[in-house]
Image: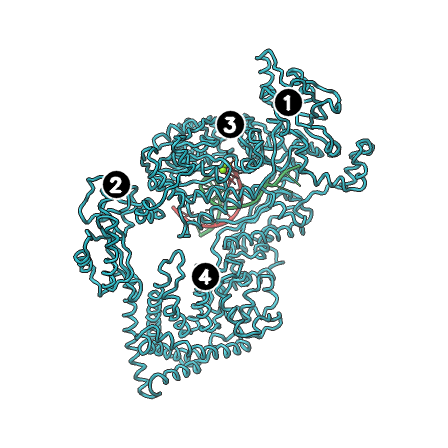
Chain colours: A cyan, B red, C green
Amino acid sequence: MSAKKSKLEKQFRSEAQIEGVKKNIFNGTSIFVNGYTVPSADELKHFMMDYGGIYHHYYKTGNTTFMVASNLPHVKIQHYKNSAVKIIKPSWVTDCIEAGKILDHKPYLLLSDFDKEQKQLNFFKANPSTSSASTSTEIINAVSPSKVEKKLNPSPKRKTAVDDNFLDEFYSNSRLHHISTLSATFKQYINELRIKRSHQFTAREFLKNLKLNTPNMEEYQPVQCCIMHIDMDCFFVSVGLRNRPELKEFPVAVTHAKGNRVPSDHAEDRRAEFELHEKRFKEKYQNSDAYKPWFIDIGESDSMAEVASCNYAARNFGIKNGMLLGQALKLCPNLKTIPYDFDGYKDVAYKLFGHVASYTLDIEAVSCDEMFVDCTSLLACTKVNVLEFATILRKEIQEITGCTCSTGFGPNRLIARLATKKAKPDGQFYVRPEESKDFIQDFLVSELPGVGRSISTKLANMNVQSCKELQDVPLSVLQAEFGNKMGQNLQRYSFGEDDRPLNFCHQRKSVSAEVNYGIRFQRKEEVEAFFKKLSAEVENRLNNVKMKGKAITLKLMIKAENAPKETAKFLGHGICDYVTKSVSLIDATADSEVIYRETMKIFNQLKVNPEDMRGVGIQMTKLTESKNGAPESHGRLDTFVVKIKKKDSPDGDTRPGPSSDVRITEENNSKLDEAGPSCSNKSKFNESEYDVTLSQVDTDYLAALPSNIKEEIIHGLRKRRKNNTSGDGNSRLGSTKNDNGVRKLNPLIPSTEMTTAITEWVSKEQIPKEYDTRMLSDYLQQLILKKEFESVNFIVNHFQKSNFLQMSPKKWSKNTFGWARAEVLGALVNAVFLIALCFSITVEACKRFIEPKEIHSEKWILSVGIMGLIVNIIGLFLFHGHGGHSHSHSSMPPHNHSRLTQLVTAGADANATDDNENDERFPPQHFHDHIHEKKVDSSTQMNMHGVFLHVLADALGSVIVIISATESALILLQTVPTHIQVDEIQRRLLEHVDGVLAVHEFHVWQLAGDRIIASAHIRCRNLSEYMKLAEKVKEFFHNEGIHSTTIQPEFVEIADFSENTEKKAPAQDCVLDCPKTDKSCTLSTCCGPSKKGRETPSPVDTPYLCRQRNNINSTQIGRGPVSEIIERGALLANTNHMHEAEASAIANPLNI
DNA sequence: ATCCTCCCCTAC
DNA sequence: TAAGGTAGGGGAGGAT
Ligand SMILES: Nc1ccn([C@H]2C[C@H](O)[C@@H](COP(=O)(O)OP(=O)(O)OP(=O)(O)O)O2)c(=O)n1
Ligand SMILES: [Mg+2]
Ligand SMILES: [Mg+2]
């Protein structure tokens, strides 16, 4: 029992003894202790008497200053609520003594805690049986309180996973769920910012200017590698205290519970669970010494809620994040609890990441309150020293978020992380590379990131506590104990070495949803119902990240055999065994039905008793990007097709009922497209028609059909499944792909309509989405496989020639030239396509020569048709195409339009009657004839002359194709256009334009066709001279036929001023090269390492370092609060921070 | 050797 | 009452 006395009490006593004379602190203040308290009433009485206070054995209204209570029944609270009685927590007494003076009692008011429990109070009030009694203590007391409870709460109904809204409610209250979600959010956030080119590094620019204009900043000392770690101080508490500033100095924790006593109905079970826990631990680690029974302090009615975060005042009492509230209250009885504020965390986290991102995007998000940042290039670019930057950054973060943070800097992530630890709270610490070995020695192994309870216990068993001790353990020993890699890592860490790079571009490897709270099932149906919900949750999460999974893992927590039935924590999981099992699927999926089905299959194999389940989880791995990722249809390519359709036919939007199968395909298609998985199974006809129509050539689909068989082969041996679900389950799995709603464009959509849709799509959409482009490429692929070469050609030509490709103002971030090159690309693709086609046809033809076959199918006719088509296309190239883009562009569509519309109608008819033969659905005869008609229009008549032309066109066509391919390739290779002579132009530029001292980095290339682009560095004397010059240079290039030029001026005079004079340099050297920082830049310039020792630290910085240097002088520099800090020289030294023993963190986890 | 599955461990 | 999630590194051991 004496062990139970808190440190605090002891401290008070010893202090009192040392002092001998006790101060008069309470000065006549009187208290009455009501009910059970910690410290006890007796102890409080002595405290009061010793320090000049008065102890009342009864509450005397108007006389007793405070009523002291830890906990009161609701009825009593209700009774006192509206009276003038001030009820305070006992810790007020101890805190006053500790402070040596009377403290404001308000933070210790017990009633304020209960204000938030208004609901419960109302509940009591609202009940008719007690409402009249609520004003009178006597009447309430007359009724047995337990009876009242029973009546109100016949069987204490607890909300478990079988209840309807459990999942939502649980997740909305789960702190761990929230921080996991936020962590993923910010990893993604950084990814997105990095992709977005338009991102502005405003704070970095500001910092640069600040440095230039603040002469009394320290001289810049370059660093070769600097990793920063930032972590918010006691994050949840800091956020919570933003609007409770009066609590800042008090010990505060964020929890769900408020520290009230808890019903002790299952005291035995709680005891038993604690003991089993201890037993398991000792068995596991074979060392009873290492075990510190964390639960010794926790009584039968102490709160088992977890402290999510506690502030540093609370940490002085030994409280830790993750500790149970009951335990924390023993350490610090007057710990103040505040509720969660999940929106606040998100808000602050966004501000934090947003602000750091305005310095650099070399950020690896670790969690919502923490990140690693590679500062190397940032510091090099701004020429600010590490600790100056830290001071500025932390000050800004505090101003923006209202919360403090700490930063650590080091040569690698390990050191940076530990430096932050040392800096906390509200501090900063910089470890220079050469200091890191010394720095790390004093850390305990348990403080190393990656070393937790298990490893530190094992090391403790080997008599290793500190990093210094760890250094002496031979590698072989570590590897024998912890495995190859872990052993290696441990040793490296112990010397302060860490070569893990920062990961700026995060790629998810798994998506899961787990619930290990409130799982209490009676029957299997309840389990099934919950798995359904969980599967739906997983589907949502997959969709949110546009992913599909190819493997499903079921995770279960099963009550350990000897664990008591009631868990220590209300609705917790108690002591459990863990079971996981996984399946690999044939096709990646995000469909909740598939996930559910597979999950149940695994579950059935595991044969668990639903009553023993304490936790469930579903995890998807082997992720692939999903093609149809975005569930929302806004801006999707196929929606444009649908829209057009609607415009065309007014009745297009009357949705067909499930029975109206016979429909024009594209309409049908769009409806089916929109249909989710839920209605996929209803009309087999629709589905199969759709599938066959679309995917006769879709290998995925072919793979999917026999997937059940394959699955049986692959997994059947192990699974030993019962035959019950094979029929239904398998047939559904076979059509999974389409159930999932993979969106496809029906190849029957006329190419004209398609081009219109594409035009609209391109003009509306900022950035082409991946699934759109895939959809488009699928569509084209199908056209090719259906041998609709003319349509393909038409669409490709459309890309090549339509206006939006040539002069689209829409530039997305990856495409600053707009779509201009697409024309060239299109030409190249077109040419390659045609060459490949010629080749395959030649081969085919040869085969036929060698081994002639009888013509007994329409395929032959089709082939002939195709050849005719090829000749036609080439002929078109020859007669229409080569002359100019616009000409063929205007002449093609009308022909195609009318023809294809007819074809579609015909095709739709064929489809409605015979959906198996769609491969040959377009009568080739019809096709060919039609083409000929067109040709007759453009030449003379259908006779020998025509035949001759066909052959001639064929031959010439090949030549043209090859020539055009070569041209396209040359353009893509950025070669200098043939009619331009670079050297000549450069020489003339120097000669003809006065004031140009030198020209270098001179490049000329062809964006497309006759759009020629030049870039050059031009040296002149100073800015004003350049202004005069610029006009002339532009004019010069204009005369040379180059209308788009990028000119980088260099000024001799300024360069001389800012750089060492010794570097005056030969005229060929570039004054505005990248600065010397690292090693990676020279190779990244256009011409490679023509000059030595110049680089950019990272691609992100390049534009700023290399191009915008001359902007600096024109920017006005403000003098904000930040510059004042600098001037005050208030670089904060790191606060020395004791290494906290991590005992509780190690002892805390309940799962052994 | 390298892969896969089923764990365990860690971090926040 | 209480809201014990989630992603990733890595090891053991078997299959290839
Ligand atoms: N067992 C834990 C650990 C952390 N968190 C939450 C609350 C914390 O505020 C937040 C950030 O975790 P940190 O490890 O960064 O801890 P703090 O920010 O609270 O304190 P510190 O100042 O040590 O960073 O994550 C939690 O809910 N449960
Ligand atoms: Mg933190
Ligand atoms: Mg943190």
**Residue A93: numbered disc:** 1
Q: Residues within 10 Å of mark 2 (few under 14, many from 20)?
A: few
Q: Amino acid at mark 2?
A: Ser
Note whether A548 is above or below A393 in the view shown. below
Look at 58% across and 61% down and name the residue there. A677
In this rendering, does residue A681 appear at all? yes
How far apart marks 2 and 3 lie (CA) works out to 53 Å
Judged by depth in the image, the label closer to the viewer, 2 or 1, is 2
First in sequence: mark 2 vs mark 4: 4
Toward the viewer: A280 or A1088? Answer: A1088
How far apart marks 3 and 4 lie (CA) works out to 56 Å
Q: Amino acid at mark 4?
A: Glu
In this rendering, does residue A479 appear at all? no
Mark 4 lies on residue: A765
Circles 3 and 4 in contact, beta carbons < 8 Å: no
Toward the viewer: A1126 or A48? Answer: A1126
Q: Position of residue A200 (x, y in %)?
A: 40, 48
At numbered mark 2, what does the secondary structure look like: helix, strand or loop?
helix
Q: Do the residues at discs 2 and 1 belong to one chain? A: yes
Q: Amino acid at mark 1?
A: Val
Q: Residues within 10 Å of mark 4 (few under 14, many from 20)?
A: some
Toward the viewer: A287 or A567? Answer: A567
- In which chain is the residue bearing label 4? A
Q: Do the residues at discs 3 and 4 belong to one chain? A: yes
Q: Do the residues at discs 1 and 3 belong to one chain? A: yes
Q: Position of residue A617 (x, y in %)?
A: 58, 47
Note whether A1080 is above or below A809 in the view shown. above
How far apart marks 1 and 3 lie (CA) works out to 28 Å
First in sequence: mark 3 vs mark 4: 4
